[in-house]
């Protein structure tokens, strides 16, 4: 199982430090990332938290999925790998 969690429905004012503090309640956190738009630098409302192991990741999902953070219920799930795209590549 992947130990990296997808965190959706984040308020735009949430910081990576706040995410780390919240998820530390469920287990040891390896890293936190909040995704920003590469052109504007604005937060996009989702991020990722990597937990130390599978047990910590499962515990975080159970404990924090639907948790209220700055007035929004966050969605916590296992991160899925980004699908590879052949966009812009020639087949020949």
Image (spheres, helix red, strand yellow):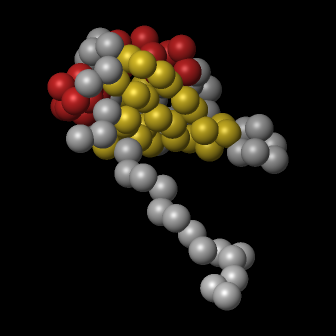
Q: Nearer the viewer, residue 74 or 54?
A: 54
> Vertical placement of 86 versus 21: above or below?
below
Image quarter hosting the N terminus: top left
Q: What residue is rendered at 31% in x and 33% in y?
A: 3
Question: Quarter of the image holding residue 33?
Answer: top right
Image quarter hosting the C terminus: bottom right
Percent x, y of residue 38? 75, 45
**Horizontal arrangement in the rendering, residue 59 relative to residue 22 (left or right):** left
Q: What residue is rendered at 38% in x and 45% in y?
A: 79
Residue furthest out toward the right:
39
How many callouts does the rendering have? 0
Question: Quarter of the image holding residue 91?
Answer: bottom right
Q: What residue is rendered at 40% in x and 28% in y?
A: 50
> Vertical placement of 71 versus 89: above or below?
above
Residue furthest out toward the bottom:
92
Percent x, y of residue 45? 56, 41
Residue furthest out toward the front:
92
Q: Nearer the viewer, residue 71 or 89?
A: 89
Q: Nearer the viewer, residue 57 or 84?
A: 84
> Vertical placement of 15 versus 1: above or below?
above
Residue 73 visible in the current orientation = no
Percent x, y of residue 25? 29, 12
Q: What residue is rendered at 57% in x and 69% in y?
A: 85
Percent x, y of residue 59? 19, 25
Residue 39 visible in the current orientation = yes
**Horizontal arrangement in the rendering, residue 51 relative to residue 53 (left or right):** right
């Amino acid at each position: 199982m992947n130990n990296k969690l997808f965190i959706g429905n984040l308020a735009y004012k949430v910081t990576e430090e706040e995410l780390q503090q919240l998820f530390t309640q469920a287990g040891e956190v390896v890293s936190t990332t909040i995704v920003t738009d590469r052109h504007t630098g604005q937060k996009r409302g989702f991020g990722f938290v990597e937990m130390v192991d599978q047990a910590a990741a499962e515990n975080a999902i159970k404990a924090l999925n639907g948790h209220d953070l700055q007035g929004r219920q966050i969605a916590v799930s296992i991160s899925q790998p980004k699908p590879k795209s052949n966009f812009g590549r020639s087949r020949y």
